[in-house]
Structures are given as C-alpha cells and as structure tokens.
Amino acid sequence: MIRLFVLTALILLGRAVQAAPLSGEFASIDGGTFAIEDWRGQPVLVVNTASDCGFTGQYAALQKVYEIYSERGLVVLAVPSDSFNQELGSAAEVKEFCELNYDLTLPMTDITPVKGADAHPFYLAVATQTGFVPRWNFNKILLDSDGEVVATFGANIKPESPKLLRQVERLLP
C-alpha cells in the first residue's frame, strides 16, 4: 500500500513539474538581457542556431515567421550556440553574419551552451520537464503564453513547416 502511495505521489509530482512555466535569463547579443518571464502572455519559439551549419539557411525562415506573427504576439528567440562546434568565434561575428546574410531583426542571445553539464538553465529545465535536449542546431522549443512547453521540433522541421505553424496559430489570438 505504501508503494502505491509513493508511486502515485511521484507520478503527480512529475506532472506538476512538467506543467511548470519555464523561466530563464539570457544575455542578449546586443548587450543587456532577455528574460523568458518578460514575454508572459505571448507564445515564444526558442531556436538554438549556428552560423556554419547545413541548417543555417533556416535563419531566413525564422525571420519571416517573426515578421508575419510578431504583430499577433509571437516572439522568436534565436539562441546562437557552439554546442555542436558550428558557431563563429564571437557574438560580434555572429551578429554581423546574421545582419549581413539574413537581415535579422528578431531577438538573439549571446552564444549559449544548449546541452551538456554547462547548458543554459533554460535548456536544463526543458530537459528535466520534457526530456527534450537539442540533438543538433536549429532545434525548436515552442512555449505557450504561460511559459509552458507545448511542442518541440528537431532541425528537420523548418520554421515555415505547416506542422510547426499549426501549433503557433493555436497559441495566437
């Protein structure tokens, strides 16, 4: 009987942990910080990016999604990362690369680890809550307006994919 009670408590505790809103502060590529909490009330698409990757062309689609949906409240946050050894050497180089090649205006963080022991706390929390860890660059995490993970997507799911955009549309007014 005690085992059943403990098992039930662990299951319920696990559900409570999974439903907890995510938070976290990121250093901005422009200086200052971004806090996930600042975007409460808006859905947020968080994408770990890299400048020297076969998926780098997705920056153009991320910018387009941002332009189309930001007026309705969507935040698209690019998180440049060298976790897969495909990022430029400095945040300044990343910023220049993205401005020159993709004319990016969406929010971007400084270069940030997204996996392993030194992963950013946001990514550690996502892994704890959902089991999702980026397996490559351009993995996507969609948060609802309460900061809860509603979907995750691998690099092969493009930002303009109907599968991803259906999820975004459900979260927007």
Image (spheres, rainbow, N blue to C red):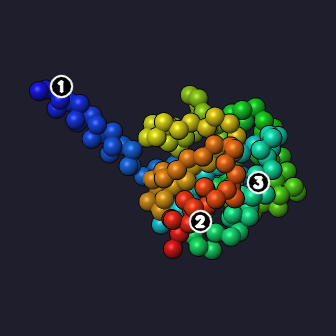
- On-image quarter of the N terminus: top left
- For disc 3, the marked residue is 59
Look at the image and tell me whether residue 101 can be seen. Answer: yes
Vertical placement of residue 33 versus 69, above or below:
above
Q: Residues within 10 Å of mark 1 (few under 14, many from 20)?
A: few
Visible residue check, residue 76: no
Numbered badge on residue 74: 2
Measuring 63% from the left and 43% from the top, which residue is drawn there? Answer: 154
Which residue in the protein does label 1 denote?
A: 3
Q: Considering the numbered disc 2 on the image, is that residue within a helix, a strand or a loop?
A: loop
Give above or below for 22 relative to 103.
Answer: above
Q: Nearer the viewer, residue 4 or 137?
A: 4
Q: Residue furthest right?
A: 100
Between 153 and 51, the one lying in front of the other is 153
Q: Position of residue 108 (x, y in %)?
A: 69, 54
Q: CA distance from mark 1 to mark 3?
A: 50 Å
Tag 1's secondary structure?
Answer: helix
Q: Amino acid at mark 1?
A: Arg
